[in-house]
Amino acid sequence: MSFPIGLAVVIELLMSASSVIGGIVAILLAKRTAKRRLEGDDER
């Protein structure tokens, strides 16, 4: 019975970690796109 419970906990941790990482990646991508837009406007 310990294996299924352990797997469930691991899956929950992975899901929460993936959601947090996804949010961080989205923020980093948004910052990069904003910088690119500013640089593009400056170049133009």
Image (cartoon, helix red, strand yellow):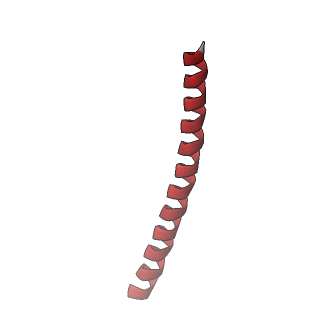
Which residue, as the protein is rendered here, is positioned at the far front?
A: 2
Confirm whether residue 12 shows in the render: yes
The residue sitting at the top extreme is 1
Give the residue displayed 61% in from the left and 21% down from the top. Answer: 5
Return the x and y of residue 32 as percentages of the image width and height.
Answer: 46, 69
Residue occupying image coordinates x 56% and y 30%: 11
Q: In the figure, 38 relative to 29: above or below?
A: below
What residue appears at the point 58 percent right and 37 percent down from the top-left corner?
A: 13
Which corner quadrant of the image does residue 12 belong to?
Answer: top right
Tell me the quadrant of the picture where the N terminus can be found: top right
Q: Nearer the viewer, residue 14 or 41?
A: 14
Q: Quadrant of the C terminus?
A: bottom left
Residue 36 in the image: above or below residue 20: below
Which image quadrant is residue 3 in?
Answer: top right
Across and down, in percent, residue 28 comes to 50, 63
Closer to the camera in the image, 43 or 20? 20
